[in-house]
Image (cartoon, rainbow, N blue to C red):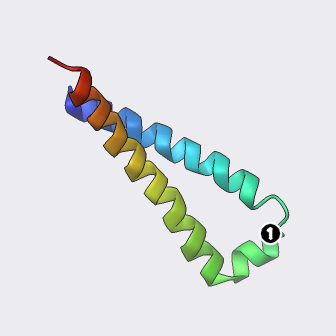
Amino acid sequence: MVYIVGFIGFILGFVGGLGILYFMLRNVSNEDLIEDKYLKLKYGLLNWGMAIAGAYYAVYIYKSYSF
């Protein structure tokens, strides 16, 4: 069951990260996103970090409330 909770947390964290990136990158042009490697690295790692954090907190909450 922990794996299912972790997977759901990962997906929700990833979706949440995409929502944050949508807000943060709304004024950046498509050309800048394609050409600038630093933007890809910086914001790509931010999104994966949010996904991992979502999985971690989902498992943490599950273990806190399970008997």
Hey, which residue is sitting farthest left in the picture? 67
- Quarter of the rendering occupied by the C terminus: top left
What's the residue at 35%, 40% (across, down)?
Answer: 57
Q: Identify the image quadrant of residue 24.
A: bottom right
Hey, which residue is sitting farthest top in the picture? 67
Q: Position of 56 compared to 1: left or right? A: right
Question: On screen, 56 above or below 65?
Answer: below
Q: Where is mark 1, residue-wise? A: 30
Q: Secondary structure at mark 1?
A: helix
What's the residue at 84%, 70% (across, down)?
Answer: 29
Numbered-mark total: 1
What's the residue at 81%, 68% (across, down)?
Answer: 28
Question: On screen, 21 above or below 33?
Answer: above
- Quarter of the rendering occupied by the N terminus: top left
* Residue 5 percent coordinates (x, y): 31, 30
Looking at the picture, tell me which residue is in the foreground, 56 or 40: 56
Q: Position of 47 compared to 49: left or right? A: right
* Residue 55 percent coordinates (x, y): 35, 43
Question: On screen, 35 above or below 23?
Answer: below
Q: Amino acid at mark 1?
A: Asn
Q: Identify the image quadrant of residue 33.
A: bottom right
Q: Identify the image quadrant of residue 35.
A: bottom right
Looking at the picture, tell me which residue is in the foreground, 5 or 60: 60
* Residue 14 percent coordinates (x, y): 50, 47
Report crowding for label 1: few under 14, some 14 to 19, many 20 or more residues within 10 A (C-alpha): few
Question: On screen, 25 above or below 14?
Answer: below
Q: Position of 65 compared to 22: left or right? A: left
What's the residue at 31%, 30% (across, down)?
Answer: 61
